[in-house]
Image (tube, grey):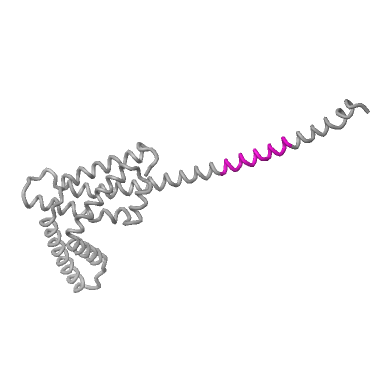
Amino acid sequence: MSIATVVTTTLVPFASVVSTATVAIWTKRLDTRSKREERMHALVLDYERRAGEDKKAALKTLISATLHVKRGAELRAGAEVTEETTAQRRIDALRELYEFRARLGLDDGIAELMIYASAPVRELTDLVLDEWDRQFREHGYSMTQLDACKRQLLKTAAETPADDSAILSGEEKWCALKEEEHLWLKRLGDGSDLDVDALLDLCNRVLKAAHMDLRGGYGIATE
C-alpha cells in the first residue's frame, strides 16, 4: 500500500473527524458563553430598571418634602417687614423644616436618596439637612414640644366623643393645645436666626437639581 493510499484512506478521514469534533466543541462553548452573557445582560438590565425606579421614588420624595419647606418659607413673602412678620415667617418655615427629615423617611429614606441621587442633588440636600441639624441643636426642646403638641392635637381630633360632656371636654383640650402650640411657635420665631430668604433660595436650587436628575441630566450617580 502506497503512502498516498494510507493518507487518503486513513489520515484524511481521521483529520476530518477531529476537525468536526473540534468545531462542535468550540461551537458548544461559544453557545454556552453567549447564553451566560445574555443572562448577565438581562440581570444588569433588571438591576438598572429597579435602581431607576428606586431613584425616581427617592427624588420624588425629596421634591415633595422640599416643596413643603418652600411653601412654608414663602407663605408670607412680600409682607411688610416688621419684627412680628419676620418672626412669623421663621415660624412658618421652621414648622415645615422640622418635618423635612420625617418626610424624607428619616435615616433610611435619606440613605436611599444619597445612594441614588446625583452629586449636585446630594450636596444641596446636605445643606438643607445641615440647617435642620443647626436649628434642632439650638432649638431642639422647643421643636420637640411643638411636635408633642401636634401629636396631641391629632389624637384629640381622632377621638370620638361619647356625649355632650365629652364634646365640651374635647373642645377645651383642643383650645388648650392650640394655645400651647402657639406659644412654642412664638418662642421658636423669636429665638431662631433662620434666614428664610436663604432657605427659600436653597429650596429652589434643590428642586431644580432634583428635576434635572429625574430627567437624567446628571447621568449616572457617582461618588
**33 within the magenta span:** yes
Q: Is residue 9 left or right of residue 93?
A: right
* Residue 9 x %, y %: 88, 30
Between 112 and 12, the one lying in front of the other is 12
Q: Is residue 21 left or right of residue 66?
A: right
Asked which quadrant contains residue 138, the reply is bottom left
When the figure is inspected, residue 160 is found, relative to residue 65, above or below; the finding is: below
**8 within the magenta span:** no
Asked which quadrant contains residue 166, the reply is bottom left
Q: Which residue sits furthest front?
A: 3
The C terminus sits in image quarter: top left
Q: What is the count of numbered marks?
A: 0
Q: Which residue sits furthest left?
A: 82
When the figure is inspected, residue 143 is found, relative to residue 201, above or below; the finding is: below
- Kindly report the secondary structure that dominates the magenta region of the rendered protein: helix
The N terminus sits in image quarter: top right
* Residue 110 x %, y %: 33, 52
Name the residue located 18 percent from the left edge and 72 percent from the top edge: 169
Name the residue located 72 percent from the left edge and 37 percent from the top edge: 24
* Residue 68 x %, y %: 24, 49
Between 114 and 83, the one lying in front of the other is 114
When the figure is inspected, residue 112 is found, relative to residue 213, above or below; the finding is: below
Name the residue located 29 percent from the left edge and 48 percent from the top edge: 64
Q: Which portion, as a residue range, is magenta?
A: 22-39
When the figure is inspected, residue 133 is found, relative to residue 120, above or below; the finding is: below
